[in-house]
Image (cartoon, helix red, strand yellow):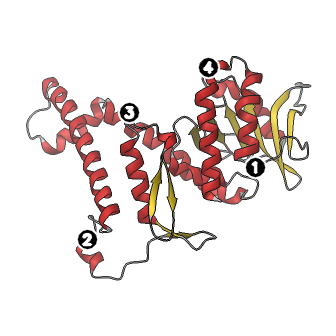
């Protein structure tokens, strides 16, 4: 199931990469990219109006005859609303005005704003029955974050689990925002960020010249730290030894690593998955990441290009 889902997801990713330059309208975007995402990836029948309703109409107050691009039904209720824009068009809250209105008057707890490449997923964490202004999940099909794929699986027809989605949404939303802040600070640290570290290692006065110097030092330290972590995790995946295990932990019996067993009785361990992600992160600098996947057998766990 997981392998099949990944194959469909990356097949669509490859299609977008190949065809995006030929798509010039919103309608073409829906036909070429969004409908395959709903049908092939999420598994809903786009040709069955009891599952997927295109041009869904729901009058809201004085707004009559407005349409949402797609409404997805599950268990005889509308569960997901989708608003589409043209491929390449930036996505922001201003593009989601209809989603905000429809979210309030339907039973849907999930709404999606997409341009066929980027998918932003919203729910109502901040106020009940009112769509949040910030997404809890964002996936770029041309730069897929494998850590987020399991969350996308929860939205598929065969695995739809609204409670699990909502429970995870809060953590996903804030972790995503924190990661963006960290990324920005590590690449272009603000003065307060630099001052935080400089004040803990430098005993002199933090003049402007010192702050400028520590701005470069902070970036260099962050880069080296990340590289060190990648190298340690790679060693761990290769040798099976956890380099950050403490003395206390080694004296206690460790829990068995998380394992996944498929229908062929092939066991995929957490260490194998971590090793795959590390190798993929390293090799994507020279190989298109969409070409890199994995295949597990009883005798070995290998990469597939």
- Residue 208 vs residue 194: left or right? left
* Contact (Cβ within 8 Å) of mark 3 with mark 1: no
| Rendered residue at 32%/82% (across/down) | 252
Q: Which residue is mark 3?
A: 184
Give the mark, 4 or 3, whose residue is nearer the N terminus: 4
Give the mark, 1 or 4, whose residue is nearer the N terminus: 4
Q: Alpha-carbon distance for marks 4 and 3?
A: 29 Å
Depth check: 173 or 276 in front? 276
Q: Alpha-carbon distance for marks 1 and 4?
A: 26 Å
Q: Alpha-carbon distance for marks 4 and 2?
A: 52 Å
Task: Characterize the local packing of mark 4: few (<14), some (14-19) or many (20 or more) Cα atoms within 10 angstroms.
Answer: few
Q: Alpha-carbon distance for marks 2 and 1?
A: 45 Å
- Residue 55 vs residue 283: left or right? right
Give the mark, 2 or 1, whose residue is nearer the N terminus: 1
* Contact (Cβ within 8 Å) of mark 2 with mark 1: no
* x and y percentages locating residue 110 in the rendered image: 72, 45
Depth check: 254 or 67 in front? 254
* x and y percentages locating residue 271 in the rendered image: 41, 64
| Rendered residue at 34%/35% (across/down) | 185
* x and y percentages locating residue 278 in the rendered image: 38, 51
Q: Which residue is mark 2?
A: 246
Task: Characterize the local packing of mark 3: few (<14), some (14-19) or many (20 or more) Cα atoms within 10 angstroms.
Answer: few
**Quarter placement of the N terminus:** bottom right
């Amino acid at each position: 199931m997981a392998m099949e889902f990944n194959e469909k997801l990356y097949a669509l990713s490859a299609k977008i990469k190949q065809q995006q330059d030929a798509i010039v309208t919103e309608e073409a975007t829906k036909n070429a990219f969004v409908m395959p995402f709903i049908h092939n990836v999420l598994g809903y029948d786009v040709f069955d109006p009891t599952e997927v309703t295109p041009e869904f109409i729901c009058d809201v107050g004085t707004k009559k005859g407005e349409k949402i691009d797609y409404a997805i039904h599950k268990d005889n209720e509308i569960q997901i609303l989708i608003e589409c824009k043209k491929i390449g068009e930036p996505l922001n809250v201003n593009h989601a005005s209809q989603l905000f209105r429809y979210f309030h008057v339907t039973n849907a707890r999930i709404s999606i704003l997409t341009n066929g490449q980027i998918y932003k997923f919203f729910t109502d964490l901040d106020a009940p029955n009112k769509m949040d202004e910030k997404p809890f999940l964002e996936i770029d099909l041309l730069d897929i974050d494998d850590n987020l794929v399991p969350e996308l699986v929860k939205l598929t027809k065969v695995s739809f689990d609204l409670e699990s989605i909502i429970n995870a949404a809060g953590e996903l939303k804030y972790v995503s925002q924190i990661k963006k802040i960290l990324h920005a600070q590590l690449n272009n640290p603000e003065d307060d960020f630099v001052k935080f570290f400089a004040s803990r290692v430098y005993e002199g006065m933090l003049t402007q010249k010192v702050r400028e110097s520590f701005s470069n030092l902070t970036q260099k330290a962050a880069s080296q730290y990340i590289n060190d972590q990648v190298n340690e995790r790679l060693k761990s995946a290769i040798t099976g030894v956890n380099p950050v295990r403490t003395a206390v932990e080694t004296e206690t019996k460790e829990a068995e690593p998380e394992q996944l067993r498929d229908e062929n009785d092939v066991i995929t361990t957490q260490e194998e998955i971590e090793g795959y992600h590390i190798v993929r992160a390293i090799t994507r600098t020279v190989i298109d990441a969409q070409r890199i996947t994995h295949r597990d057998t009883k005798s070995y766990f290998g990469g597939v290009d």
